[in-house]
Image (cartoon, helix red, strand yellow):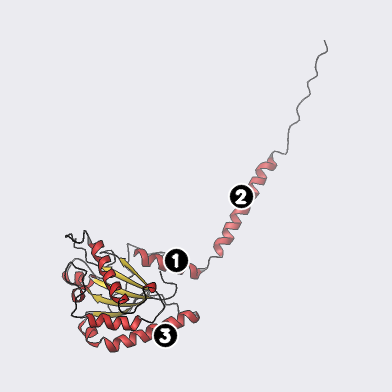
């Protein structure tokens, strides 16, 4: 019986090409990612950071960050970190519209502004019309008092014709509430915002432009550790949103 001749296997000297090809692919992917990062639109990043700050009260992209920083408008009428986007026709028109509304309200709400029961504030999202809760609502209630309904009527008349979105925000202090009507401050803050919306829609303000939100005590403008701070935190904010605001 003939013996089968066994041929010696040839060594593959080109296996290194597989590893080399993998390395080149990874290197290409690395440079693609680096190129994409270098092309980030700084304006978009800024708008993203502003949106997160407005929604969460956290300051982003700051080297000296030591904790949460509130970005809500204070009661001085201005906001230090306010981002004003007046570029383009839409932004200019909105700015002009809000100036006109503010001037009209300053004329019609003279006594209310002087007494402090209502304030006009340039906030991060737009013009804020701030209602002090004790002037417009009984304690623990969402029923609007009739005593100063003329203030709300003046606001309704000023905003009735505008097409920009309007957000009505209810805010409380940090003291818990639980009664037969409201289980928590969340319920109360939302109910007060809804009451203001109902008043506006009954005075020719289009509900298509309106939205409501209840923040309870989660967006304070002052320290809840004292009576004065809690008084300032109990409020309803009517926010005339600028273009591109959240």
- The quadrant in which residue 74 appears is bottom left
Q: CA distance from mark 2 to mark 3?
A: 53 Å
Q: Residues within 10 Å of mark 1 (few under 14, many from 20)?
A: few
Counting residues from the start of the chain, the first of labels 2 and 3 encountered is: 2
Counting residues from the start of the chain, the first of labels 2 and 1 encountered is: 2
- Residue named by callout 2: 26
Q: Nearer the viewer, residue 148 or 218?
A: 148
Seen as rendered, the residue at the extreme right is 2
- The quadrant in which residue 52 appears is bottom left
User: What is the x, y in percent for residue 68?
Assistant: 32, 63
Q: Nearer the viewer, residue 62 or 211?
A: 211
- Residue visible at 25% across and 76% down? 131
Tag 2's secondary structure? helix
Q: Nearer the viewer, residue 36 or 139?
A: 139
Q: Residues within 10 Å of mark 3 (few under 14, many from 20)?
A: few
Q: Which mark, residue 227?
A: none
- Residue named by callout 1: 48
User: What is the x, y in percent for residue 12?
Assistant: 73, 34
User: What is the x, y in percent for residue 149?
Assistant: 22, 80
Q: Residues within 10 Å of mark 2 (few under 14, many from 20)?
A: few
Q: Which mark, residue 96?
A: 3
Lateral position of residue 85 relative to residue 36, left or right: left
Q: Which numbered disc, 2 or 1, marks the residue closer to the eye? A: 1
- Residue visible at 33% across and 68% down? 212
Image quarter in which the N terminus is found: top right
């Amino acid at each position: 019986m003939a013996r089968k001749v066994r041929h010696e296997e040839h060594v593959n000297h080109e296996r290194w090409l597989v590893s080399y090809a993998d390395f080149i692919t990874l290197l290409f992917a690395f440079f693609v990612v680096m190129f994409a990062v270098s092309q980030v639109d700084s304006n978009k990043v800024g708008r993203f950071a502003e949106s997160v700050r407005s929604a969460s009260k956290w300051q982003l992209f700051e080297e000296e960050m030591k904790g949460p920083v509130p970005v809500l408008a204070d009661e001085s009428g201005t906001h230090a970190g306010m981002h004003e986007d007046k570029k383009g026709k839409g932004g200019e028109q909105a700015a002009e519209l809000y100036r006109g509304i503010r001037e009209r309200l300053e004329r019609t709400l003279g006594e209310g502004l002087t007494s402090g029961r209502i304030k006009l504030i340039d906030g991060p999202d737009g013009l804020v019309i701030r209602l002090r809760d004790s002037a417009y609502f009984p304690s623990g209630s969402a029923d609007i008092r009739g005593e100063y309904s003329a203030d709300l009527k003046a606001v309704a008349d000023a905003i009735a014709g505008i097409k920009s979105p309007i957000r009505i925000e209810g805010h409380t202090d940090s003291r818990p509430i639980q009664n037969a009507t409201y289980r928590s401050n969340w319920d109360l803050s939302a109910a007060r915002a809804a009451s203001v919306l109902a008043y506006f829609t009954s005075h020719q303000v289009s509900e298509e432009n309106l939205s409501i939100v209840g923040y309870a005590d989660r967006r304070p403008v002052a320290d809840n550790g004292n009576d004065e701070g809690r008084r300032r935190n109990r409020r309803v904010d009517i926010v005339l949103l600028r273009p591109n605001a959240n």
